[in-house]
Image (cartoon, rainbow, N blue to C red):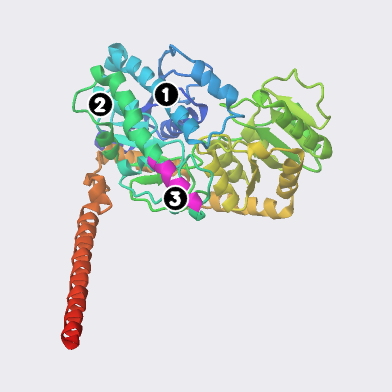
Amino acid sequence: MLILRLSLFLPLISGYKILIYAPKFAYSHLHFLGSIADTLVRSGHDVVMFVPELDPLLKSNGSTLARSVVKPFRLNDTSKSDSFKKTVWIRNWESLAQIFALFSIFAKEQAEQCRAVLADEKILDGLRAEHFDLGITEFWTECGFAVFDKIGLINIVGALATGLMEFMNAEIGLDFQPSYMTTQFTKYSDKMSYMERVDNLITFLIALAMRNFYSASIFDQAVGPYIRKDFSVKEKMKSCSFIFVNSDELLAFPQPINHKIVYVGGIAVKQPKPLSEKLQYTLESASDGAVLVSFGTMVSSADMPKEMEDSFLAVFRKLSKVKFIWKYENESDTKDDPPNLIRRQWIPQMDLLVHRNLRAFITHGGLNSITEAVNVGVPLMVVPLFGDQWKNAQAIKKRGVGVIVDRRDLSEETITTALEALLSERYQLRAKHLAKMIRSKPMTPQERVVKYTEFAAEFGPITNFNPASLTLNVFQFYMLDILIPFIVFALIFLYFIFRLVVWTLRCILHQSSSIGKAKEE
């Protein structure tokens, strides 16, 4: 009887086997997927992180609790990605030429890596033998879907380490309206002028073409010999039961979504740990507050142009009562530093942000950094550099918890003005209010990840949430198959009306002329 009773609870306590495809190309993406993995492991599930290496400088595998399968890989040519990191401070990443260059680098590196992964039958056989219940992969990379297809894993949940991406909406069944929904590559808010909407529309169409044609063709050419002929990344994306989006609905710009979208912004926010003695003393002694300066892991402060660095140092000297902690990759370059500045090659970002005396955060606008700051109520000065950082910055500005300073406008005056505003009571109160709202949401991001993953693992692939729009082509979706014939018919009809009016007028004029001539005779 005891055995029978215990067996009734086995389905409740036995975990699912979950595979997460997490290529090592950017810390923020790896950390996001690793946080999902750790959350699921804590809930009793058997999680494997498949981590194909792309950036050898990333030492972490993303997760501290899940099993890891690492695929070593080295690019044949790293010059372009290295050049990107070195020149990120000076390039105009809002220009279409630079957007294309960024797309090209990413697409070619991902395709080269994916070819190596799909050619490794030993690793694929090992994954296939695990008989996973569910796979999780990012929409950013097509390779995860190809790997799952190769090992026979059809039950998939998608993920986005960024917010919702405009050129992925079609695979989710969502519309994209450039009139108020900004792309990842423009610098506008959701309220745009006429010319801003024109630019936003053009950028959207070009990004869509680059994703659907240029990037897709590079992927197909690279991995074609290793996948079945009728394999379709788009169809695999459409089959996802849910999509975990690393964005907080209280911060992101509002837009229409469907039941497949699950906001899990904050899942990657780390639990704070005690600070070192020196950092703890620095913050405790900062009676007028402290400011954290960090531009993430992909961008080096040491590569910043000297005039920009000099502007920051001038501000630090001017605000001498405020302590500054700067993530700076070259600690030896400190001879001109004011006494209220500490430089560190690495900083415990979240541990610093939670301290009561940390009053502001100067950041590049990466989604993870912004999410950490808003979760603990620290206002931000955002200096967007590339990608989705302008969009993130505009969301911060819209919520009233931060200011934007264009990197091309960085000067002693603009930085001072921004920091003085952030240190004011108005910004401090707004930031604390937003943080309280986020903490008070009915479900935590961890609860959402666990509940939706378990639901998908048990019942997936779930088609109940697939809108009919997924089966429509672009002409049907935007009703062009109706509007175009209607407009053509209307133009033809107006043309015949015009011809009829002209013919009638001619008849009247001809008749009037004939009557006039008759009277004269």
In which quarter of the view is residue 492 placed?
Answer: bottom left
Q: Earlier in the sequence, mark 3 or mark 1?
A: 1
* Callouts 3 and 1 close, C-beta under 8 Å: no
Q: Answer few, some or many: residues within 10 Å of disc 1's Cα (few below 14, many 20 plus, some between 14 and 19).
A: many
To which residue does mark 1 refer? 23
Mark seen at residue 181:
3
The percent position of residue 198, horizontal first and vertical second, equals 45, 49
Which amino acid lies under the numbered mark 3 shown in the image of this protein?
Met
Residue farthest toward the bottom in the current orientation of the protein: 519
Would you say residue 34 is visible in this rendering? Answer: no
Which residue type does callout 2 highlight? Answer: Asp
- Magenta span contains residue 196: yes
**Callout 2 secondary element:** helix
Instruction: Answer with left or right where residue 344 lies relative to residue 15.
Output: right
Which residue is labeled 2 in the image? 149
Magenta range: 195-205
Please indicate whether residue 510 sits to the left or right of residue 121 in the image: left
- Looking at the rendered structure, the kind of residue marked 1 is Pro
253 to 504, vertically: above or below: above
Picture residue at 63% right of the left edge, 38% below the top: 383
